[in-house]
Image (cartoon, coloured by chain):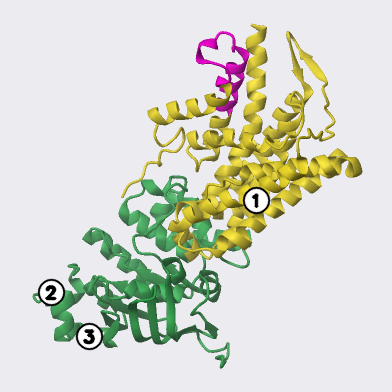
Chain colours: A green, B yellow
Amino acid sequence: MPEAPPQDPPALHVEGLDVMYGRALSALRSVSLTVPHGAVVALLGANGAGKTTLLRAVSGTLRLHRGTVTAGRVRYGGTDLDGRDPVAAVRAGVVQVPEGRRVFAGLTVEENLRAGGLGLSRRAPALVRESRDRVYGLFPVLAERSGQAAGLLSGGEQQMLAIGRALMAAPRLLLLDEPSLGLAPRMVFRIAEVIREINEQGTAVLLVEQNAGMALSLADHAYVLEVGEIRLSGPADELARTDAVRRLYLGESADEPAGDQGAA
Amino acid sequence: MTTLLDTLLNGLALGAVYALVALGFVVIFKASGVLNFAHGSLLLLGGYLVAVLHDDLGFAGALAVAVLATAAVAGALDRLLLQRGDPDPKAAHVQTIVTIGVDIVLVTDLARRIGGDLLTLGDPWGDAVTGLGPVTVADSRLAAIAVSTVVIAGVFALFRFTPWGLSLRAAAEDVEAAALMGVRLSRVRMLAWCLAGALAALAAVFLAAFPAPGLERTTGQIALKAFPAAILGGMASPPGALAGSLLIGLTEALVAGYQSELHVLGEGFGDVAPYAVMVVVLLVRPTGLFGAKGAVRV
């Protein structure tokens, strides 16, 4: 098995990926996608296009949904991730923020963050504190509410907590599944700022979104997934100008995609 | 007055032992979503090991071996049998049914070995009693209260302060999100089963000690009384299991203590009482004492 030399800056390579749920339901067909080191890549598509399935294949949670990779491979840096468990992905530096936030509602904010660090092989208290302080720096509101049950936070705060929890594992690639879902426009803007900030600190981001305006304003490169296949791909600003994307994802009247908040 | 105090102390001791068993139910349920119907047979296995080993190893040595062995059997049961099934968290009911089969196999074999005998466990308390003011209490009951308190406090500390405890609580809230954090679910749940097995073996000792006549092949069925305790506590709540166990223990002791006054309910109402209490509690609070979902904003 050819392994990339470890000195290479790690990038995510998805090559010719086929995914099935059960024995009959094909969710992805020969999907290929690359997230270069330190980049922000957007993955757009309607409900049921297979965006979440792709993230599951990368993070190793397909099995929990009775899904399997039937062809192709997923590599991050020198590590093969297809068919591995989520522990392997986290250890390799790939961490997913699930759709719908999925914070541990009965645990406190602080405990949620500690839980985010559970997958690290070394959990030196000093390192954990350092990551936590970084998260509190990004999201001061979480520091204020550290002792509160996460279920009592507002939707936007829960999204911040979900992102902060993932950052506790010190990821080099963050997989974000619809972080803008169900949030007020102002909060969507705030989350976009945070994603930019996280990226500037050196973490690559694969951003799955229905809110194409927000995603394309952040991304360097974008892919459009339709019924399990990659339909379009290219630099984000070019894609934002194509007719198909404007019509399908930005709404025909959207003259300024970057400011548009309307999701499909 | 003396009768009441006597009864309350008895109830407390019973409740403390039920709590060891109920906590096992809860830990397993939280970690794997499985209602462990094999818990009674694990308890019986632990008691049986103490009974056959204490002549050679002494009581303490036999207890240590029994606790470790029962923990190992419970852990192996989870890892080698239950975890082989469908990994979908929604399929836990299938594993629950598997535990019924495991229970039948284990109980049948242990009952064959025990036969009609009453096995003594060689515990150091014997039939000694201590006078506490107006009441006299069996030393074994005082030991049950003391040991259970210490062990349960230890288990709560594990939940609260260790990475395993945090993993368990996180996985109980959301298995997939916990998996995404890199929590090793199979190890977390196997350790939960081990812990529950160890607690069951410990409980067996007190259930077979004075004033009980010894370990019988039916001792494992006592675990069934801890089931309503866990359920009325909310099933996924360790403090709930504790409260439920005390409630069941006190109820049973009160029913036994005032049997003559309760004659109208018929003989043997004590056996039914735990379930009666469970039904009443669930009628008033359908999610159990501590089972109400915490305030959640969506």
The residue identified by callout 1 is B105
Quarter of the figure that contains the C terminus of chain A = bottom left
Callout 3: chain: A
The residue identified by callout 2 is A251
Position of B11 with respect to A238 (left or right) is right
* Residue A150: % across, % down: 41, 49
Residue type, mark 1 in image: Val
Toward which corner of the image does residue B177 lie, by quadrant?
bottom left
**Callouts 3 and 2 in the same chain:** yes
Q: Is residue B80 above or below residue B240?
A: below
* Residue A118: % across, % down: 56, 61
Q: Residue furthest bottom?
A: A2
**Residue span colored magenta:** B246-269
Residue A43 visible (yes or no): yes
Q: Secondary structure at mark 3?
A: helix
Residue type, mark 3 in image: Leu
Callout 2: chain: A
Residue placed at 65% from the left, 30% from the top?
Answer: B16
**Callouts 1 and 3 in the same chain:** no
Q: Secondary structure at mark 1?
A: helix
